[in-house]
Amino acid sequence: MRRPILAGNWKMYKSASEAQAFAELLLPQIDSGLLVDIVIAAPFTALDRLGRALGGSVVSLAAQNLNAEPEGAFTGEISASMLSELSCRYAIVGHSERRALYGETSADVSRKAKALQRAGIRPIVCVGESLEERDQGLTLEIVGAALEQSLSGVEAGDGSALVVAYEPVWAIGTGRNATPEIAQEVHAFIRESLDKQFGAVAESIRIQYGGSVNPANAASLMAQPDIDGALVGGASLEADSFAALINFVAQSAGQETP
Ligand code: PGA
């Protein structure tokens, strides 16, 4: 039984003070006994303050990117050990915005994921196809290749050392999300691919769905056998809607919520 993982990806939203205010609104709405892992991926500048505001709660801190090198003359960059010192437990790597806007390749993603694991941080490795690729029937080919290259040399450990996020690019920030059946088909394919790379432990690796997830559509997505949580952009920016999502996912994990 995989423990669901719900991660908010704030992208370039929220200053440090806004992040603290969010935590103060969110935490009273969350039951500390939830059987769901909750994560917030905040901008670098908000991590320290958000980490302090979340301290001791069930919500884990995450980054949205990093540089794969341990240190050096890389102006403007942030290393895995810097994130680890701020108590980041996760970091997103290979988000489609980074791939499309900053030219990140799957080889870069693999280097970043390995750097995170060396620092004791779990990578959330994102893969997904564009609308054009889906229309051409290339979804599984594109996702399979990105997954294989992005996870090259990455460890699975007991299954909790990494998280995979399937995010169809056409569903991100568009309000158009994949139907649960479409998402499940790709998730099942991803799990098969993980099985080829890691063996039986693939059954324990969480695969999140991402792309216009909100409190109204979360339950039907989470009901799919290979969907183990969500990576959420827009609906994670308001404390009330993120709390509602957390409660939906907790309910679908068979748990009472406050
Ligand atoms: P969205 O973003 O929920 O706003 O579609 C998801 C993501 O980019 O991770």
Image (cartoon, rainbow, N blue to C red):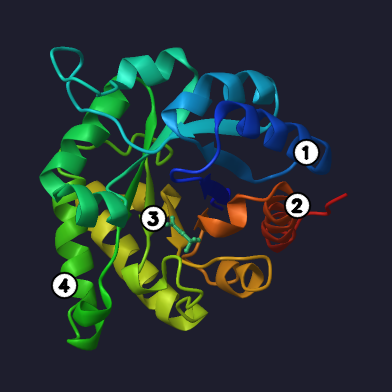
- Mark 3 element type: strand
Where's residue 238, x and y in %?
67, 50
Where's residue 197, x and y in %?
20, 51
Q: Which residue bears the numbered disc 3?
A: 165
Quick one: label 4 or label 1, which is nearer the N terminus? 1
52 to 149, vertically: above or below: above
For label 1, count other residues whose C-alpha is less than 10 Å away and answer few (under 14), some (14-19) or many (20+).
some
Where's residue 194, x and y in %?
28, 55
Q: Quadrant of residue 147?
A: bottom left
Please, what is the three-letter code of the amino acid marked with disc 4? Glu
Q: Which residue bears the numbered disc 2?
A: 240
- Asked if marks 1 and 2 touch (Cβ < 8 Å), the reply is yes
Please, what is the three-letter code of the amino acid marked with disc 2? Asp
Residue in view at x 64 percent, y 46 percent: 36
Please, what is the three-letter code of the amino acid marked with disc 1? Leu
Image disc number at residue 159? none
| Real-space Cα separation, disc 1 to disc 2, in angstroms | 8 Å
The answer as to whether callout 3 falls within 8 Å of ligand 1 is: yes
- Asked if marks 4 and 3 touch (Cβ < 8 Å), the reply is no
Q: Quadrant of residue 192?
A: bottom left
Q: Which residue bears the numbered disc 4?
A: 141
Quick one: label 4 or label 3, which is nearer the N terminus? 4
Q: Which residue bears the numbered disc 1?
A: 25
| Real-space Cα separation, disc 3 to disc 1, in angstroms | 27 Å
| Real-space Cα separation, disc 4 to disc 1, in angstroms | 42 Å
Q: Nearer the viewer, mark 4 or mark 2?
A: 2
For label 2, count other residues whose C-alpha is less than 10 Å away and answer few (under 14), some (14-19) or many (20+).
some
| Real-space Cα separation, disc 4 to disc 3, in angstroms | 16 Å
Q: Nearer the viewer, mark 3 or mark 1?
A: 1
